[in-house]
Amino acid sequence: MNLRKVILSLAAGVPLMALATGGHGIEKSNLDPSTKPGQDFYQYACGGWMAANPLPAEFARFGTFDQLRENAREQLKDLILNLAQNPDSKVKGTNAQKVCDIYALAMDSTRLNKEGAAPIIPLLEIIEKADTKDLATLFSDERLLFDNPLFGIGVGTDAKNSNSNVVHIGEGGLGLGDRDYYLEQNETNDKIMKAYETYVKRIMTLAGYSAADADRIWSNLIKIEKKMAAAKMTREQRRDPQARYNVYTVDKLQKEFPYIDWALLMKNHGLGTPDKIIVSSPQYLKTLCEIVPALTEREIKDLMLLDAVSSATSLLSDDFYNASFELYDKVMSGKEEQEPRWKRAMSLPNSMLGEAVGQLYVEKYFPEESKQYMKTLVENLRVALGKHIDNLSWMSDATKAKAHEKLAGFTVKIGYPDKWKDYSEIEVDPSLSLAENARKASLWFIKDNFAKLNKPVDRDEWHMTPQTVNAYYNPTTNEICFPAGILQKPYFDLTADDALNYGAIGVVIGHEMTHGFDDQGRQYDVDGNLNDWWLTADADKFKTLADGLAAQFDAIEVAPGVHANGRFTLGENIADQGGLRVAMTAYLDAVGDKAKDIDGLTPLQRFYLAYANVWAGNIREAEILSRTKTDPHSLGKNRVNVSLRNIEPFFKAFGIVEGDPMFRPENERIVIW
């Protein structure tokens, strides 16, 4: 039996009918009637919402997406506070005890401020006494949680054998995140670099080092990080999965990058002698071969000391958190105030015990009818995307057949996992500090990850918790996932008109499906293997279209003298456009001519307004600059205005014609999926 054909026939058999009867329309107060749709559709659709929701001081960006996340945080707060009344919260070893105790530890500012740097002093002493000639042993010391500032190591799917887990080695992190902060000199970067220097010196003195020591640590750190930054792949290079797939053995690693004993490192990590190791950036490791042997013992230790302290700032006293906030939130993102402590505290149980919290969340906030509605929506979108593949003028029949095969093979995950993660080996001990408990939990996650080596990939595993307000496509399992957290208003509303649900969560579904066919996802086959299933001529045509879409976004000035990066955001922009087009087809298939005007707005107008309202928001200029460097998603305004300017039904829906700023001539429009 051909399972893929069975799946496709089942998908095609889903009744294409409206999912709700009636329902409310667009909230007209979200609109800005003083702006014409053809002038600036984003302002027209979202201006009322933006005026009514000025940017709160604790946010660098606040929009409907963030509002949904805030609603979820309030729900989680209520769950955890009520959980404290549950008798299980007093029983050691239960999930209730762990969730309540780690939250209480994070809320106890009096204790945290009294402890100061004490919880991390033992780690700093280990580093100070270490033998840096033996980096393999140092980087695998459990007391340091494999604290390695030079490169990352973990276990994950083999992109060319997607049922198998292998060892991966990647680039090390940088204190400022992106390489360009170190390599590009301009007024903004100079300001950030100065704030980084202040931050480093401040947290090291808080950790007990003298001003002279802090000066030395900064000098050593920035010298090393600038060299590391110059060797790292660019944002655009990281988008090429073939370039990141470089097969090594332990012997080959040792021969090409001899600055560390790789066999000993693997053994100490409990990984044995792996047959296959994937290195994402050989050039980076090669540069480390030039950097590391020239470093003094003091320089290596200073690099590790700073890494140990910086990674703990959110787990220590207010002084440490304040220093971190000043750099990362205030200077780099433009925030004016810190979040209230309960929001920061919530992140601990939410990350350490995510699925335990998620189980409580779905029991209270995710009704079964929502899951059934989503299943129908997803299958309607799958059928619609199949129609779009059939109608592509630039793709051959042979490649279309493969595309259909991949589409039929999509695994769909909705709401929550069927099997919950077991946290029984994670202990939360209130007699220990918050930092100690967090580091012990982190050690469990590292060991849990390493234990996957030589085991088949668990395709039932979720890579987001149910309470997460987001969604994803995973190319190596060919799956789309929609956690319960995003299936809330205004993205998903069982009481709304169908046009709103298709324009909001329907576009999100189509977006994630299209990721399977974006510039990265298209390189993976139905089984999740990095495998070229395209005819060369079709791939060339796709690349030409993708280049055109990238150029459209490159042309947008996001701040004075700063343009969007259309190549870096290409995958998300392809997915946005695909989601919009496919969701509209699915909507029209579902409602036919039965949909009526509501409050003077046509069905198509409500669809496009619902999409725009998903991205309504206000944002600070510092955050615009930061996201342009680090976020593969375009800014909300561009996700609306630039994407819609390629879509003919949008022009017709709002009477947008040549001469209007939102109009784009047909010969300049880019349509991929």
Image (spheres, rainbow, N blue to C red):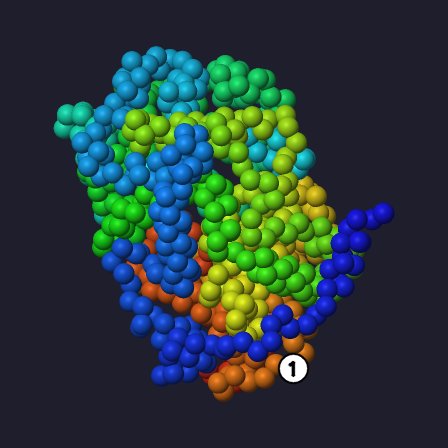
Q: Is residue 568 visible?
A: no
- Horizontal and vertical percent for residue 534? 71, 51
Which picture quadrant has residue 367? bottom right
**Is 369 rendered above or below residue 460?**
below
Element type at mark 1: loop
Q: From where the camera sits, is residue 600 visible?
A: yes
- Of all residues, the one furthest to the bottom in this rendering is 600
Asked whether, in this view, residue 28 is left or right of residue 387, the answer is left
Q: What's the residue at 31%, 73% (across, down)? A: 51
Residue 257 percent across, percent down from the top left: 49, 21
Residue linked to disc 1: 594
Which is more toward the observer, 331 or 105? 105
Q: What residue is rendered at 37% in x and 43% in y?
A: 85
Q: Residue at 72% of width from left, 68% of height from top?
A: 15
Q: Viewer-proximal residue, 461 or 381?
A: 461
- In the displayed image of the protein, which residue is found farthest to the right? 1
